[in-house]
Amino acid sequence: MSEAIDRAPVTLEEVARAAGVSRSTVSRVINDLPGVSKRAREAVAEAITSLRYVPNQAARNLVTRRTDSIAVVVSEKGDQVFGDPFFAGVLRGVSAGLGTSHKQLVLLMSQGDADRDTLENYLCSGHVDGAIVVSLHGNDLLPRRLVDAGLPVVLVGRPLAGGSVPYVDSDNLTGGLVAARHLLSLGRSRIGTIAGPDDMAVGIDRLIGWRRALGDAKRPTDAVVHSRFSIDAGARAMEELLERHPDVDAVFAAADIIAVGAMQFLQSRGVRVPEDIAIVGFDDSVLATMASPPLTTVRQPVEELGRTTTWRLLAQLAGERHLPPSILLPTELILRSSA
Amino acid sequence: MSEAIDRAPVTLEEVARAAGVSRSTVSRVINDLPGVSKRAREAVAEAITSLRYVPNQAARNLVTRRTDSIAVVVSEKGDQVFGDPFFAGVLRGVSAGLGTSHKQLVLLMSQGDADRDTLENYLCSGHVDGAIVVSLHGNDLLPRRLVDAGLPVVLVGRPLAGGSVPYVDSDNLTGGLVAARHLLSLGRSRIGTIAGPDDMAVGIDRLIGWRRALGDAKRPTDAVVHSRFSIDAGARAMEELLERHPDVDAVFAAADIIAVGAMQFLQSRGVRVPEDIAIVGFDDSVLATMASPPLTTVRQPVEELGRTTTWRLLAQLAGERHLPPSILLPTELILRSSA
DNA sequence: CACCCAGCTGGGAGCGCTCCCAGGAAGACT
DNA sequence: AGTCTTCCTGGGAGCGCTCCCAGCTGGGTG
């Protein structure tokens, strides 16, 4: 029927007129401020519903300098982001953390290098009150620049480029350490690892943990291959690892998805898991339960990561002082059949 | 060092002063409008970079009544959304469809029933220029109300509550039909289906297609069980289907994730796929390739769904006339081992 | 009866921007 | 020399809201 022709944006003024009061009073009602008589409050409420008044956010933002929305920035091509259970979990956590705060979540992804400026501009031009930045490859300068521009930022995952941007991360180092210790405790003699990319903190930290455990046990720490976070890459990495170190009988994979790829490769070669080679993954994603055999893995509290980060950001926005600059969340070994 | 204390928001005015020109000229430069001398243009550009000027979006939106961002609304608890490859693909498509349009993608999910109003308010209060709404269970009124409020909306997936809101969807009916025909062509005699929820168009349309194919072949169409889109639900549905119709030797599952659950159940009962029971899924998600045996499935062009929807919305925003109200995208049978 | 204070109310100013229109400068014609 | 274009420029008005301050009522107090 109505083809959206009517775009007659109702304003505060009109509501005020309809309710027989002033702009100020209507504003007070809308923002739930005290100092309005019951009569006026009701008249305004009625006028608002009958006129279907919706406040103009732009006008409000202009004067309040707040937007009541926060950004989650994923500096990764959209492709990767979804389907990745890690992002999924973090986002769920953020969503939960926002809870009743009445703030909106705005998800942004840099769709390439080119739009990096667009992104930065968007964030700095007052569209959001703060930002959560997830997964930065290497020494991404974005967070630093946002902070310099005065935007409150909290990172999910330790950044490589130190900076002083607060972050929340899983205790990846301890996770790697526990995984390696578990393999040692199984009596495995030659323990390798398929580490993550060496330009990401997760990759590095888990590797360091693994190394420390082997070092503590006076074992060699040379059986290392790096891999991207994908099944294919995991399979290729396993192949390479086996080529270079045919004697490995246990592997710590820096992610479940890598572990799954590795297991697929092993099975294609007739190598039995865990009999011939034991495997420990990392994440405890659905992949771990779906894999055959089910994957022994280091669980990281993904959802909590998102929740905690959000809490940290909201606290900062609320002007809280003495916040912990950064936070590490504990990991936990989950025993299944692969190791 | 600088603890973000300086929040000295540089304004157009200041840039103008620094460049020795007027507000108007600066504005023209920023918006890349003609009618500015090279000299002025350069002076302004320099002032902008040296002052690190960033335009205030709120102020701009207030007067232009545009925000250059569009919302993707997922009316589903955040939990579900991520990890679901369908959403992932759609979002990727949207992201790609936005391409060079210089519009930002804002992802919103209704985190429950309570915040339904918050969501609607957010959308209607000028935060976005248009909205893409994905996955509505049943007769969701949100899209209708958004349209009534004057917001351009395009849906991903046919809504049940007809309305006249434009949508883009896969040709689910033909997909179901082709799946069933394939099972018939294999010589299977008793073909069942695990349909999707009967309050969702995808569930209904695929079921109708399946029914038509069997009807055309004069086969019974009573072996139907409904299921939610999850592995567990798929497994339970398979159990129920088998209980009620022990003679089925082929099953069309309305989604890969259901098919995987069904296969897991069958395997746990020692039923062989495809020898004893052939299975066809729907979606052609990663699950289909990962499953053992790999799943024969109906591919739907998920990413294209997102891309097309975005294109449709952008065209509408650009004021294009005579747009097709709704669009159906073809599906395709992918043969693997499960049927 | 004068006074005061609390409780409400209304209007002005201004947030930072875009849009419109009136002008000025410079060149090209009568 | 005068006029008309063309190109560029500057300033006013106003988008819809919040915030501040001044005013207006009415009941309590000295």
Image (spheres, coloured by chain):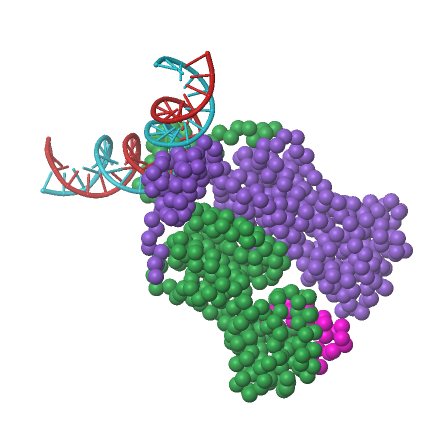
Chain colours: A purple, B green, C cyan, D red
Q: Does the magenta stretch include residue B266?
A: yes
The magenta region covers B253-277
The answer to which of A147 and A48 lies nearer the viewer is A48
The quarter of the image holding the C terminus of chain A is: bottom right
Tell me residue A250's x, y (percent): 83, 57
Residue located at (61% from left, 77% from top) = B224
Quadrant in the picture for residue C4? top left
- A37 versus A225 height, above or below: above
State whether residue B187 appears in this view: yes
Give the camera-side residue of B166 and B220.
B220
Q: Is residue A138 above or below residue A226?
A: above
Q: Residue at x 64, y 56 (%)?
A: A84
Q: Is residue B192 magenta?
A: no
Q: Quadrant of residue A57?
A: top left
Q: Residue B92 in the image: state x and y as whole percent.
A: 54, 58
Image vertical order of residue A171 relative to residue B180, above or below? above
Q: Is residue B26 visible?
A: no
Residue B219 at x, y = what percent?
Answer: 58, 86
